[in-house]
Amino acid sequence: EADIYQTPRYLVIGTGKKITLECSQTMGHDKMYWYQQDPGMELHLIHYSYGVNSTEKGDLSSESTVSRIRTEHFPLTLESARPSHTSQYLCASSEWFGTRGNEQFFGPGTRLTVL
Amino acid sequence: TQLLEQSPQFLSIQEGENLTVYCNSSSVFSSLQWYRQEPGEGPVLLVTVVTGGEVKKLKRLTFQFGDARKDSSLHITAAQPGDTGLYLCAVYDRGSTLGRLYFGRGTQLTVWP
């Protein structure tokens, strides 16, 4: 069973608010990812991390930022939320090497609605 | 341009029916994965196929990797309501040290009792 957690599961906020989506994993994985998922569209990688103090932007331009101060924690922050940020946000992690190095374990997601 | 094309996009069937969904590309891949995502949850890996022509079975689910390693299919026998979910195929970019996955848009399967 995957041990990766996301909070909150659902969030409805007004435009202009600052929000942080939390993601934690207890598997000791070095690699972590944030995806954005919209109905009928592929998962878009928006941020990733190789390990502590390593963060990079993914393919999809995003106004969010991430940090990786601890191996197990990879929060995503939106400084000023807008309706265009409304989406499902999925966090994932994977091992660096090994036979399962390319299997990604996903959290349950945060459904964000910005009014 | 999508790297992976999944079809059909939606599939609605009755319990007990058989079905096949497809994942196609013009590129060759070293491996391909299938994930299932249930409502309100994140995707969960079902299987990884790595060899051209490979067939893997997971209970009532049969996965096949094309001989040329450009496409894959998922066949479900005697579908059950518990099979309802979004089926995603994904490929691993070995050229990237990140080990990133590229996903298709998925097939949304609904199985009615």
Image (tube, coloured by chain):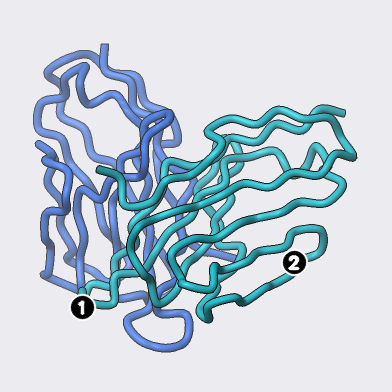
Front residue (pair A26, B48): B48
Q: Is residue B35 left or right of residue A93?
A: right
Determine if marks 2 and 1 fall on one subunit: yes
Quadrant housing residue A15: top left
Front residue (pair A27, B45): B45
Chain of the residue under label 2: B
**SS at mark 1 in the image:** loop
Report the residue at 54% width, 60% height from top.
B72
Report the residue at 20% width, 48% height from top.
A46
Q: How far, Cα to Cα, is label 2 from label 1?
A: 30 Å
Chain A, chosen colour in render: blue
Residue A67: assigned label: none
Q: Earlier in the sequence, mark 2 or mark 1?
A: 2
Horizontal and vertical percent position of residue A90:
37, 46
Task: Estimate how packed mark 1 is, as few (under 14), some (14 to 19) or many (20 or more) residues with alpha carbons within 10 Å.
Answer: few
Report the residue at 38% width, 78% height from top.
A95
Residue B97: assigned label: 1
Q: Is residue A47 left or right of residue A21?
A: left
Is the N terminus of chain B in the top left, top right, bottom left or bottom right quadrant? top left
Chain of the residue under label 1: B
Horizontal and vertical percent position of residue B11:
65, 31
Residue type beneath disc 2: Leu
**SS at mark 2 in the image:** strand
Report the residue at 26% width, 57% height from top.
A74
Residue B58: assigned label: 2
Task: Estimate how packed mark 2 is, as few (under 14), some (14 to 19) or many (20 or more) residues with alpha carbons within 10 Å.
Answer: few
Quadrant housing residue B14: top right
Front residue (pair B16, A43): B16
Query: Decide: marks 2, 1 in contact (CB < 8 A)?
Result: no
Horizontal and vertical percent position of residue B55:
67, 73
Chain B, chosen colour in render: cyan
